[in-house]
Image (cartoon, rainbow, N blue to C red):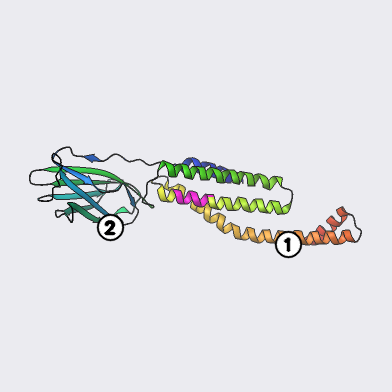
């Protein structure tokens, strides 16, 4: 049981992983590229990248005689995708459809854009973070998760304390199952949190995934054992009551009932 407490305490520290990315880089002369690319991409999902191009000096949209190139690199620097667009689709919008297979690995990917006309040019670079949720791990989400895990841990400790302090067997069973359910909820939450938002410590999600399934599968034999123990206690209590109604002392009746059931 103490190991379970330590695991939940460790997860609170390790799971508040806030991810930050480098700011975009933009050329200061020639063409100004306004990116519509979001900073977070869902793993293995198709992605529509689009940009608008302006004259950096006048701010006027440039839609003629401009060719834009997009390059995508993964977190290891491997070149994944290259696309060219010289015909804006609508409202001076240059776009590329990037297949989800280019985002099969989680981590920081780099997008490089280069747009050129006959007289002007400009570049734009941006990092995108790939994770299974395709969302940013904000400070608010991280704090909400940490507070929730702290609350679960407090309930878990109280229930664990109750197992060793409550005298009635029914209370012990209740406290045990509360602990078991809280452990299932806690491991599932940590697993999903790290799986969805983490771009590092990927092994941590796997550890809590194993713990979650272990706690789920162990619930079935424990349920059978609990029912068997409850049945045993009820039978013994009925025998004790029967012997005492015949005039036997409580201690002797208890010993005789338990000896009979053991046999």
Residue at image coords 44%, 45%: 141
Residue 233, horizontal then vertical, whole percent? 75, 58
Disc nearer the start of the sequence (2/1): 2
Residue 8, horizontal then vertical, whole percent? 54, 44
Vertical order, 90 against 147 (above or below): below
Q: Is residue 212 magenta?
A: no
Query: Which segment is the magenta one?
Result: 186-193
Question: Can residue 195 be seen at all in this image of the molecule?
Answer: yes
Q: Is residue 190 magenta?
A: yes
Residue 209, horizontal then vertical, whole percent? 49, 53
| Residue on which disc 1 sits | 231
Name, please, the residue furthest toward the left. 118
* Element assignment for label 2: loop
What secondary structure is the stretch in magenta mostly built from? helix
Name, please, the residue furthest toward the top. 28
Residue at image coords 12%, 49%: 66
Q: Nearer the viewer, residue 68 or 2?
A: 68
């Amino acid at each position: 049981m103490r190991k379970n407490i330590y695991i939940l305490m460790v997860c609170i520290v390790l799971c508040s992983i806030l991810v930050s990315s480098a700011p975009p880089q933009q050329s200061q002369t020639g063409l100004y590229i306004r990116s519509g690319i979001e900073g977070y991409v869902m793993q293995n999902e198709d992605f529509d990248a689009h940009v608008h191009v302006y004259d950096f000096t006048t701010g006027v949209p440039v839609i003629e005689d401009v060719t834009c190139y997009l390059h995508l690199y993964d977190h290891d620097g491997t070149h994944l995708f290259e696309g060219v667009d010289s015909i804006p689709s609508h409202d001076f919008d240059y776009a590329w459809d990037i297949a989800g297979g280019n985002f099969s690995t989680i981590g920081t990917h780099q997008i490089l854009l280069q747009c050129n006309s006959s007289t002007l040019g400009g570049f734009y670079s941006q990092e995108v973070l790939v994770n299974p949720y395709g969302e940013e791990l904000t400070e608010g989400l991280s704090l909400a998760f940490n507070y929730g895990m702290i609350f679960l841990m407090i309930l878990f400790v109280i229930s664990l304390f109750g197992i060793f302090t409550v005298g009635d067997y029914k209370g012990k069973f209740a406290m045990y199952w509360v602990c078991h359910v809280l452990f299932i909820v806690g491991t599932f939450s940590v697993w999903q949190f790290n799986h969805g938002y983490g771009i590092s410590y990927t092994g941590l999600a796997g550890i809590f995934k194993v713990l979650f399934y272990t706690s789920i599968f162990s619930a079935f034999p424990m349920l059978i054992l609990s029912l068997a123990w409850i049945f045993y206690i009820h039978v013994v209590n009925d025998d004790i009551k029967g012997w005492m109604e015949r005039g036997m002392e409580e201690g002797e009746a208890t010993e005789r009932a338990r000896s009979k059931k053991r046999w």
